[in-house]
Every structure is written in C-alpha cells, then in structure tokens.
Image (cartoon, rainbow, N blue to C red):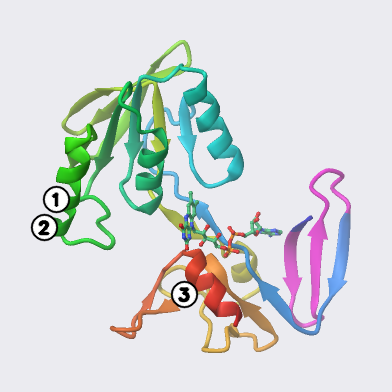
Amino acid sequence: MEAISIDRAAKKVTARNVDTGEETVFEYDKLVLGTGSNPITPPIENLDLKGVYRLNHLTDASAIKQAMDAGEVNDVVVIGSGFIGMEAVDAVFNPRRSVTVVEFRDTLLPGILDTDMGQLLYKNFYEQGLEGRFGERVLKLEGEDGKVTKVITDKGAIDADAVILAVGVRPNVGLARDAGITIGETGAIVVNEYMQTSDSDIYALGDCVENTHLLTGKKVLAPMATYANRQVG
Ligand SMILES: Cc1cc2nc3c(=O)[nH]c(=O)nc-3n(C[C@H](O)[C@H](O)[C@H](O)COP(=O)(O)OP(=O)(O)OC[C@H]3O[C@@H](n4cnc5c(N)ncnc54)[C@H](O)[C@@H]3O)c2cc1C
C-alpha cells in the first residue's frame, strides 16, 4: 500500500494498493511518518544505459552482485565517495577488476573528512589498487548497443562496463508537504525533541526528518539508521 494523502482536519490517511489501485482510508489519532529518502539523480546524460546501477534497495545490490558474479564486469566506476559510494567500492573491489571512484569534491568521504585525512585514507586505498579522481565532475555516460562503455567527466574519459551512482539521498517529504506539514531549510520535515511535526498529532522520524547537530545546534540532514534508531526511544 502506498499512502497517497493525509487529511489532517479529518485525521484520515488514504492509501492505494499498488497492484490493484484500490484505495483504503485509515483513521488515526496519532500518525507516524517514516517515509525515508530517495536517491538523488544527478544531471548526467544517459543514466538509462544498461550497466548503470544505484545502491539504495536490496534489488539494486542483487543486480550489482549478479553482474559481478557473471564475470561481465572489468571496469567499474563509482560516482560519489560518500558512505554508500565507499561501501560500493568495498563490495566490487577485486584485484582482477579496475575500480575508479569519481568525486567532485577534493577528498574521499568529503562529508566527514578534511582533505588531509581523506588523502591519508586514499593513499591506503590507492596502494591496494583503487583509482580516485577528485575535483572531477561526471558530465555524461557513453554506451554501445545500449550498454555503458565510458564515463565522460570535465577532465577526461574513463572506461566503464559498470557504473554505480552514489551521490546521496534526499528526504522523501512529498506526502508531508502536501498535507501542509512544515518542511525545514534542509528539505526535511521539521520536528521537535519529541519527534512531533508542526502538527502535534503527527510524528516523523528517520531519513525524512531534520536532525539537530550536537555541536553546532544547527539543523542538518543525517540519513543514518543509527540516528533513526535513537529517534524511536
Ligand atoms: C547502501 C546503504 C548502506 C547504508 N548503510 C548504513 C549504515 O551502515 N549505517 C547506518 O546507520 N545507516 C546506513 N544506511 C542508511 C539507512 O539505511 C537509513 O538511514 C535508514 O534505512 C532510514 O530508515 P527510514 O525508516 O527512515 O527509511 P527507509 O529505510 O528508507 O524506509 C522508508 C520506507 O517507507 C516506504 N515509503 C515511502 N513513502 C511511502 C508511502 N507514501 N507509502 C508507503 N510507504 C512509503 C519506502 O518504500 C521505504 O520502505 C545505508 C543506506 C544505504 C542505501
């Protein structure tokens, strides 16, 4: 079932059966939103070529594993070197394969590491065979017979028979926004310390909400299961 609308005045949620299209209305006293996040699709041409993967659902992971196990893949390019990009690198890394990570910022894990620490980490990966291209932006993909063959960046071309897109996620807030619930500057749902939204009968948690940074006190996006777990307790 997909929840498609919230009627806050009547305290009802309408959901649609994704197979049959049949709609059901649920009444609530308190409602909890845990709509998660969606992978960002960057403005890169030809993302629909075969051999281009995301890594956000189990089905994505299965598709990547299947391609690797079938021995079809010699050159992997991972776009983005955040947590998910680096997990992808770890998963596909193999001495018989070339693995390149392209990151438009200047280091690995740029969301959490300064450049000097990132370079130290990269040195270790480089010695094991990872190619890192930093400060480089992917513009488009090229292919033959519908299958990806090259990644074109603003600095050159990289051979690729598999490309994994890992450029981050965006909070999935459409349902909340349409219901008139306040969305913060970060793009996620605003909640107080009890995880209540701007409607006190509607709570939200997980990737779809803003977090408060413990040091700066600023609102931040932190789409991690570790934080989601704590929001429940
Ligand atoms: C590859 C990968 C590795 C990760 N590794 C880590 C890690 O090591 N440590 C860590 O802390 N975090 C990790 N994360 C992040 C972690 O998975 C998320 O932070 C966590 O899943 C968020 O939980 P959630 O319940 O908010 O959202 P989700 O797990 O995304 O669940 C939201 C669910 O809501 C459903 N949904 C959305 N809208 C509707 C609707 N309208 N109606 C009905 N259903 C709806 C979605 O289909 C989805 O199933 C990883 C994420 C990825 C992709």
Question: Which one is in front, 10 or 60?
Answer: 60
Q: Is residue 6 found inside the magenta-colored segment of the image? A: yes
Residue with the mark numbered 2: 116
Which numbered mark, 3 or 1, is in the foreground of this view? 1
Q: Residue at x 44, y 77 (%)?
A: 211
* Above/below status of 65 relative to 23: above
- Could you tell me residue 115's position as x and y percent? 14, 57
Distance from Cα at disc 3 to Cα at disc 1: 30 Å
3 and 1 marks in contact (CB < 8 Å): no
Q: Is residue 43 visible?
A: no
| 63 displayed left or right of 160 | right
Instruction: Tell me the amino acid under the disc marked 1.
Output: Gln
Q: Residue at x 57, y 62 (%)?
A: 36
The magenta segment is 3-22
* Above/below status of 80 relative to 35: above
| 224 displayed left or right of 79 | right
Residue with the mark numbered 3: 210
Quadrant containing the C terminus is: bottom right
- Could you tell me residue 20's position as x and y percent? 87, 44
Label 1 CA crowd tier, 10 Å (few <14, some 14–19, many 20+): some
Residue with the mark numbered 1: 119
Q: Is residue 203 visible?
A: yes
Label 2 CA crowd tier, 10 Å (few <14, some 14–19, many 20+): few
